[in-house]
Image (tube, rainbow, N blue to C red):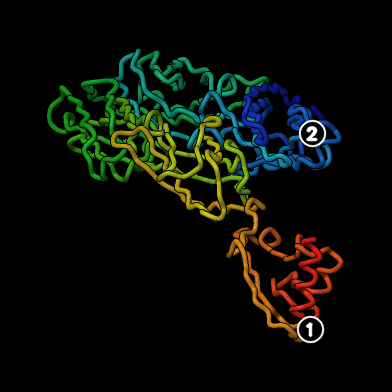
Amino acid sequence: MGSGAGERGGAERRPVLFPFLLPLFCPALSEQIRYRIPEEMSKGSVVGNLAEDLGFSVREFPTRKLRVSSEKAYFTVSAESGQLLVSSRLDREQICGKNPACALEFEAVADNPLNFYHVSVEIEDINDHAPKFTQNSFELQISESAQPGTRFILEAAEDGDIGLNSLQKYELTFNPVFSLINKEKQDGSKYPELALEKTLDREQQSYHRLILTALDGGDPPLSGTTELRIQVTDANDNPPVFSQDVYSVSLPESVPPGTSVLQVSATDQDEGVNSEIIYSFFRNGQVFSLNSKSGEIRTQRSLDFEEIKEYSIVVEGRDGGGLVAQCTVEINIQDENDNSPKITFHSLLEMILENAVPGTLIALIKIHDQDSGENGEVNCRLEDEVPFKIISSSKNSYKLLTDGTLDREQNPEYNVTIIATDRGKPPLSSSSSVILHIGDVNDNAPIFHQDSYLVEVAENNPPGASIAHVSASDPDLGPNGHISYSIVASDLEPGMLSSYVSVSAQSGVVFAQRAFDHEQLRAFEKEGES
């Protein structure tokens, strides 16, 4: 693939072509090229020879002016070699987050003739993120009365990578009192639980320090650590018990701040202060608030499905004697149709000749909707009756084509409005307008204002006098509409004609070249009749 791709194992090129026949004089060959490269390739690395994969010959390539049409300039095309090059940092996690499939899709544009080609570059994950805890250490308080087998949910580490390169397991430094259990949520993410193996005795040892390590599945694996600082508290017979280990709720993203989400509840069989439970977040990103007495959770700010789709919160219930119970609150954010489609024009022709055949390619149109599912599926149409049409090109891409006969003399320009509507309920729409200018061609012949002109001239007129004025018009523009006049036929012989009259090529004024003599002209007429 080239030296630029060799730093991270090379880029795998998989060009796939899908040709479609379009009208003559409109070479709109739709081709799809796919490449696969690792993330974090250095700037200038070669993705593949795009010109070669599109079938451009060495002689043809310099005139085609191959280039990339994209909102973000991740790639560029070498003007000398036609190779597709990396032009900015490709951070897979920044581009696609945790999505298992990550591909950058864009259009390559070529001139002479104008055409668009769909290109897809799949970005593969590399193990460039180590698991990381949010804090260097965590404090835990465990009562000496806690029974062996009691479990405590620990802070989970975060890993920006996906697949095997993501966080796979946790390990704990050896300690005969505690063990570690690796747990997995429904979405596949891993989190640790600390299990008590033996009865604690605060009088013998009131403090334990353990190292928790998170490891990913890379080769070699990367890791991150945090210190667990466990304080053994004095006995309290009964710990709080939550009514559920896991609370799950779904919440529309449009709910306002202050909306009640759910209420957690724990009970304690002790009496007095030892049965009074105070609720708190073990971990929270300040998105939700918790009533420490009632256990009610409310939204604290606006939610956005496009920003975060789910929250996992650990809630602690602590009684007056210091015993703690934990539960997990899973909050799933539901997408709503709160984003209108956005329309962007690419490679718009500045001028469309009026003799352009139906099906001529005018522009590429990109549509983007941040919503998911049907809320993000968009249909496009043209407003009003115009001699143009819009057809789907590829995912979120459309082509604007001519769809009828154009006549500059009737319509020198068109205000074309494109309306994009998503499939949400209710649907959201947006529109964008563009002025299309029609270019002139020489498709109109000059027309005289009269079919014939009758001119009477008195004899003995002065030579050079203006005796008539003919006039014609042409609706075309520029040189196509410029008119010149000349005499092409007469009853007199050509040699004699030029001695009698002439016409101005610019103005159409007819001049007498000599003085006319009525008797003399009659003699010519009789001679002609004989």
Residue found at the far left of this picture:
272
Give the number of the disc on residue 349. none
Please indicate, yes or no, whether residue 123 appears anywhere in the rendered image.
no
Q: Is residue 242 left or right of residue 281?
A: left
Figure quadrant of residue 314: top left
Image position of 163 with respect to 394: above or below: above
Residue tagged by mark 1?
A: 463
Residue tagged by mark 2?
A: 4
Q: Is residue 1 left or right of residue 22?
A: right
Helix, strand, or loop for circle 1? loop
Figure quadrant of residue 145: top left
Residue at x-position 58% and y-position 64%? 450
Distance from Cα at disc 2 to Cα at disc 1: 84 Å
Residue at x-position 73% and y-position 71%? 506
Where residue 502 appears, x then y in whole percent?
77, 72
Helix, strand, or loop for circle 2? helix
Identity, as a three-letter code, of the amino acid under mark 2: Gly
The number of numbered badges drawn on the structure is 2
User: Pointer 1: residues within 10 angstroms few (<14), some, or many (20+)?
Assistant: some
Where residue 119 appears, x then y in whole percent?
64, 31
The C terminus lies in quadrant? bottom right
Identity, as a three-letter code, of the amino acid under mark 1: Pro
Image position of 78 with respect to 237: above or below: below
Observer-nearest of 131 and 231: 131
Q: Earlier in the sequence, mark 2 or mark 1?
A: 2
Image position of 430 with respect to 422: above or below: below
Where residue 358 appears, x then y in whole percent?
57, 37
